[in-house]
Image (cartoon, grey):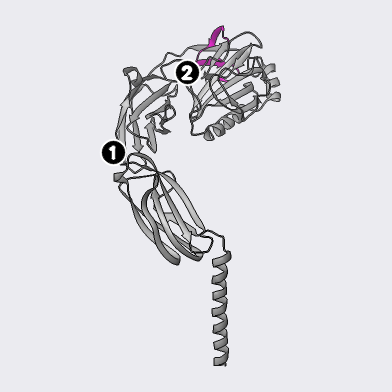
């Protein structure tokens, strides 16, 4: 049984220890208060009244707190706390603020001898404007040949959070046509096998504060008169190339992976360059080929004739994502231009010096020399462009129509 004397001295010891701990924290503690602000996040978008709570604690105790808006405009100044913990609600009236970027700053000071402070500034955006959007199109924009890309654009009155275009049973992300632009665009690949008909593209648009708008645009897929070609490949060359490079199935797997990993960023600008000093297009996009090796197939790229071992260059800005030899394509380079747009260069004699996967490359920079590696019957460049891993006509990207 514990005696009263034991209880008394135990209590006195606890009081003395607590007083000593408090005294120590007052004189020697240099840690800042622990503070949390809820209701607003860094670079978040807000409208109406934003209800926030500033809460925190300190090893000794909190003396006071202040909250400022933008350039030291006071919301709360030197509010007395005098407690180890606190919770202080307040409101940001965004309707009294201009559209755009603002900042909230809090300063929490403890009551110790050192007056330790925790100070933090959080940037945020005010968005009280209604969402307004409109399609940007010309009459020709509403028609697209098989094997080409449909270019859809709309203009918004402010920066949006997300826009998804639904067309031909698939979804595509819309993005600004250039930095800080309020014109958004989307490129929709139309397969060479797509049935000519009238279709609808639906764009679901959302801003940063939850407003949504849906746009619809009809477009026509037009039949294209693709040519035919007979191709003869030596069986011995096919066997030799199979021993030197990876399979076509491996190439398709590599392209699928590269497309999936393509950055959500537009790395290209302007028109594409034709990637070599071409004398002629020996095989047009979409040509129907007949060969002993493949039977009947589509050549969904273009073949460019040029001088043997002449320079081949990047058609646009981007990042090198594949540098590899394949049986059918020979020495191959693939460049990612962002948002799932990739260009491929086949049959290279050799690669450009110091060209590696992961390199950022500018259009016009050499990628290799024109050759006939892979399933090639002569010196030429096979130039391929894929959008969302669907092959589209590369020459369309060399014109100002996109």
- Compared to residue 20, the image places residue 380 above or below, namely above
Q: Nearer the viewer, mark 1 or mark 2?
A: 1
Rendering coords of residue 14 (x, y %): 56, 80
- Compared to residue 283, the image places residue 192 above or below, namely below
Q: Which residue is mark 1?
A: 130
Q: Quadrant of the N terminus?
A: bottom right
Say which of 35 and 110 sits in front: 110
Task: Find residue 290 and report its image quarter.
Answer: top right
- Compared to residue 94, the image places residue 168 above or below, namely above
Give neighbour class at mark 1: few <14, some 14-19, many 20+ (Cα, 10 Å): few
Say which of 307 and 265 sits in front: 265
Q: Which residues are magenta?
A: 277-295
Left or right of 351, for residue 49: left
Residue 377 in sight in this render: no
Tell me the distance, in whole angstroms, between the alpha carbons under discs 1 and 2: 35 Å
Of all residues, the one furthest to the front in this rendering is 113
Rendering coords of residue 288 (x, y %): 50, 16
Residue at the image point whose x is 50% and y is 63% from the top = 58
Is residue 291 a member of the stretch shown in magenta?
A: yes
Rendering coords of residue 380 (x, y %): 61, 12
Marks 1 and 2, the one that precedes in the sequence: 1
Give neighbour class at mark 2: few <14, some 14-19, many 20+ (Cα, 10 Å): some
Rendering coords of residue 361 (x, y %): 58, 24
Residue at the image point whose x is 56% and y is 6% from the top = 279
- Dot 2 falls on a residue whose secondary structure is loop
Residue 33 in sight in this render: yes
Is residue 275 a member of the stretch shown in magenta?
A: no
Left or right of 214, for residue 28: right
Q: Which residue is mark 2?
A: 271
């Amino acid at each position: 049984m514990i005696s009263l004397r034991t209880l008394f001295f135990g209590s006195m010891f606890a009081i003395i220890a607590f007083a000593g701990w408090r005294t120590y924290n007052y004189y020697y503690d240099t840690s800042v208060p622990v503070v949390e602000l809820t209701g607003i996040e860094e670079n978040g978008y807000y409208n109406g009244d934003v209800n926030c709570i500033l809460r925190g604690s300190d090893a000794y105790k909190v003396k006071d707190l202040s909250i400022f808006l933008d350039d030291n405009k006071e919301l709360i100044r030197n509010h007395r706390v005098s407690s180890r913990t606190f919770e202080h609600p307040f409101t940001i009236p965004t309707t009294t603020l201009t559209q755009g970027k603002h900042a909230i700053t809090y300063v929490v000071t403890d009551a110790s001898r050192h007056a330790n402070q925790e100070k933090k500034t959080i940037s945020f955006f005010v968005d009280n404007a209604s969402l307004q959007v409109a399609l940007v199109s010309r009459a020709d924009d509403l028609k697209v040949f098989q094997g080409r890309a449909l270019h859809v654009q709309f203009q918004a009155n402010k920066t949006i959070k997300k826009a998804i275009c639904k067309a031909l049973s698939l979804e595509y992300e819309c993005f600004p046509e250039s930095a800080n632009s309020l014109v958004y665009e989307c490129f929709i690949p139309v397969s060479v096998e797509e049935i000519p008909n009238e279709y609808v593209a639906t764009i679901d648009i959302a801003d940063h504060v939850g407003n949504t708008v849906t746009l619809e645009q009809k477009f026509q897929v037009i039949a294209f008169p693709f040519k035919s070609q007979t191709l003869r490949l030596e069986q011995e060359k096919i066997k030799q190339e199979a021993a030197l490079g990876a399979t076509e199935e491996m190439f398709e797997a590599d392209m699928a992976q590269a497309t999936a990993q393509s950055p959500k960023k537009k790395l290209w600008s302007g028109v594409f360059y034709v990637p070599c000093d071409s004398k002629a297009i020996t095989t047009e996009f979409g040509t129907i080929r007949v060969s002993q090796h493949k039977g009947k197939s589509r050549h969904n790229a273009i073949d460019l004739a040029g001088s043997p071992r002449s320079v081949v260059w990047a058609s646009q800005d981007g990042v090198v994502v594949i540098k590899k030899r394949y049986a059918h394509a020979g020495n191959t380079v693939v460049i990612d231009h962002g948002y799932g747009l990739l260009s491929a260069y086949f049959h290279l004699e050799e690669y450009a010096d110091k060209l590696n996967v992961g390199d950022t490359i500018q259009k016009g920079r050499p990628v290799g020399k024109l050759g006939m590696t892979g399933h090639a019957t002569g010196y030429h460049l096979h130039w391929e462009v894929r959008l969302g891993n669907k092959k589209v006509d590369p020459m369309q990207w060399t014109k100002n129509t996109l």
